[in-house]
Image (cartoon, rainbow, N blue to C red):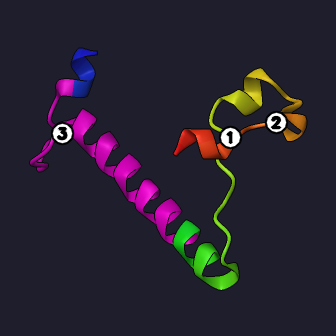
């Protein structure tokens, strides 16, 4: 973990901050892609979270979205 706290030469940020910056940048692109998809067809991408991996039969899962609001 201590290597993540090191500041590479000629950089103002630690390795950990640089990794988080890359993650943030990727998530920006994911959000942009989702927004473009939503504007193009009026439907957002279906969010399954980790449930998809825990329950591969998620397509047949009954979810009452009215109760979630």
Separation of residues labelled 2 and 1 (CA atoms): 12 Å
Q: Which residue is mark 3?
A: 8
Q: Secondary structure at mark 1?
A: loop
Q: Nearer the viewer, mark 2 or mark 1?
A: 2
Mark closest to the chain's N terminus, 2 or 1: 1
Mark 2: give few (<14), some (14-19) or many (20+) Cα within 10 Å.
few
Q: Is residue 9 magenta?
A: yes
- Quadrant of res 36: bottom right
Q: Position of residue 16 (x, y in %)?
A: 26, 34
Start-end of magenta stretch = 5-33
Marker disc for residue 48: 1
Tell me where residue 50 appears, x and y as whole percent. 65, 30
Residue 6, quarter of picture: top left
In percent of the image, x 14 and y 44: which residue is there? 13
Residue 62: mark: 2
Left or right of residue 10, residue 65 in this image: right
């Amino acid at each position: 973990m201590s290597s993540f706290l090191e500041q590479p030469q000629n950089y103002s940020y630690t390795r950990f901050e640089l990794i988080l910056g890359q993650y943030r940048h990727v998530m920006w692109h994911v959000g942009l892609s989702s927004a473009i998809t939503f504007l193009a067809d009026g439907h957002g991408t279906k969010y399954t979270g980790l449930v998809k991996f825990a329950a591969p039969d998620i397509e047949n899962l009954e979810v009452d979205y009215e109760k979630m609001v």
